[in-house]
Amino acid sequence: MEANPRSTGRLPAAFLTPGSSSFLDFLAAHSPEMLPGGRKLPEGVVEAPHGTTIVAATFPGGVVLAGDRRATMGNMIAQRDIEKVFPADEFSAVGIAGTAGLAVEMVKLFQLELEHFEKVEGATLSLEGKANRLSTMIRGNLGMAMQGLAVVPLFAGWDEGKEKGRIFSYDVTGGRSEEHGFAATGSGSIFARGSMKKLYRADLTEQQATTLVVQALYDAADDDSATGGPDMARRIFPIVTVITEEGFRRLSEDESSGLARSVTERRLEQPDGPRAALL
Amino acid sequence: MSTPFYVSPQQAMADRAEYARKGIARGRSLVVLQYTDGIVFVGENPSRALHKFSEIYDRIGFAAAGKYNEYENLRIGGVRYADLRGYTYDRDDVTARGLANVYAQTLGTIFSSAGEKPYEVELVVAEVGAEPEGDQIYRLPHDGSIVDEHGSVAVGGNAEQISSFLDQRHRDGMSLAEALKLAVQALSRDTNGTEREIPAERLEVAVLDRTRPQKRKFKRIVGRQLSRLMQADNAAVTKTDEPSDEAPEE
């Protein structure tokens, strides 16, 4: 009557161990080889497609997170229509610059981590809690970052307790800092940040905030060869997402193409974009 | 060294089954019914925090009667199994059939291993399909068998009586309000045939709603939505998913 647990097909002990609500912890205990940080790395630098610019801005009532669509490998455009902004759960989103393959895997794990917690606990994590989990995941990737496979996200979400949109930025070591107003990450971030610095105001409407991030992405694409601008011929436009009290929403293709078109049209008259007052 | 008493294997299994059945019968019953837009879970549960029903994956729900710590353990195991499988392959590759199999193996091994006490639980694993024909409901008794159910199923204390009551009255294409009404009627019948009132606050209700636009079809029905559904005339209610998507914890 004694059964061998390995041969019966029953759930292994790790599945039935109470205590942890984290999918990452479970994966680390049960099959560590599936974690991105748990793999042995070969020597040398690997060349892989890199995603580029992500921008975010808050407005009263929410936060917008947007990204361009280009992935580059050295001087080559690896992909024109890559998607780098994803919903993390119902009230938050994550946009990732850096090694595209790893970034997509990390987002998948992060989404699962939040969903897993929600199902096991019957309650959602706080926004700070979500931001901290992401921090841990990036820290686990440090070994790969040293070999040129860095992943640097921007995390934005609606804080139900504080009733406002918040943005968190990260560095390769997992260091997390809250950004007030606006933030950018990736190769074009310097130009995007400069653009938003001149255009951002604290009292933007949702419509204005989405225009702001598209302007910033246009400026980044203008000066950074690795960032893609709106591609009218192929109908490839930036991905723009909005998170409010109502939850996560990705702008439809019609909405984002409308935004990109109106920005581009204005730039035909004023190539450098809107001008801020001198004093 | 003293010789242990001889107990025949038949007797040993019968004792274990009796033990598990008694444990399950102490708990309150719950029912799972198909309705036109999905599958509804209804049970009497005075606790707001300790759920009998929960979400396992996109289209898969879980219901359990019996000992809380044991089925909670199995529930978390199921969530881990489903999430790992969905991560390894794809979200579409997580099925109720696979999960029911793993549960059956687990319960069966525990039941027949002399070193462990049998679990005093009876589970239901349900998956909502894109069409009513695609709905699947599996009942998993304490001993590791699987019963493929159609239409309605009851587990827990008074299960047999409730099942036969439901079998006579359940039909395909019921609205959510009708199914809910039938479920409450079935649950409020006592062993001796008398009826008692179960107020809405003591009910735990959840649905797997195929019309939900989100990937995750599981939703708890609480508060105002529940009382509205319970008061609704059978004819008046046809739309199930109200736009007010209330948070599970309220």
Image (spheres, grey):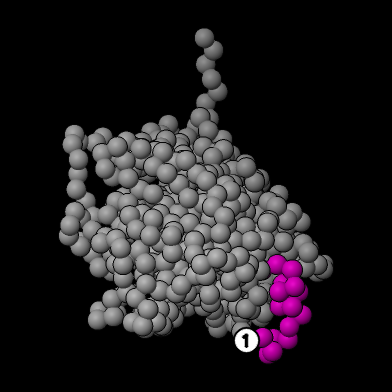
Local crowd size for mark 1, using a 10 Å CA cut-off: few (<14), some (14–19), many (≥20)? some
Q: Is residue B177 visible?
A: yes
Residue at position x 61%, y 65% from top? A202
Query: Magenta span covers which residues?
Result: B221-238
Q: Quadrant of residue A69?
A: bottom left
Q: Quadrant of residue A111?
A: bottom left
Residue at position x 28%, y 76% from top? A231
Residue A125, above or below A63: above
Residue at position x 51%, y 59% from top? A182
What kind of residue is marked 1?
Answer: Thr
The percent coordinates of residue B11 (x first, y second) are 54, 37
Residue at position x 53%, y 33% from top? B116
For residue A183, side relative to residue B67 (left or right): left
The percent coordinates of residue B107 (x first, y second) are 49, 45
Q: A52 or A136: which is nearer to us?
A: A52
Q: B34 or A105: which is nearer to us?
A: A105
For residue A182, side relative to residue A238 (left or right): right
Q: A68 or B207: which is nearer to us?
A: A68
Residue B16, above or below A59: above
Label 1 sits on residue: B238
Q: Quadrant for the C terminus of chain B, please.
A: bottom right
The percent coordinates of residue A17 (x first, y second) are 51, 37
Q: Is residue A120 visible?
A: no
Q: Is residue B228 magenta?
A: yes
Q: Quadrant of residue B231?
A: bottom right
Q: A275 or B157: which is nearer to us?
A: A275
In the image, farthest residue toward the front: A279
Q: Tag 1, which secondary structure?
A: loop
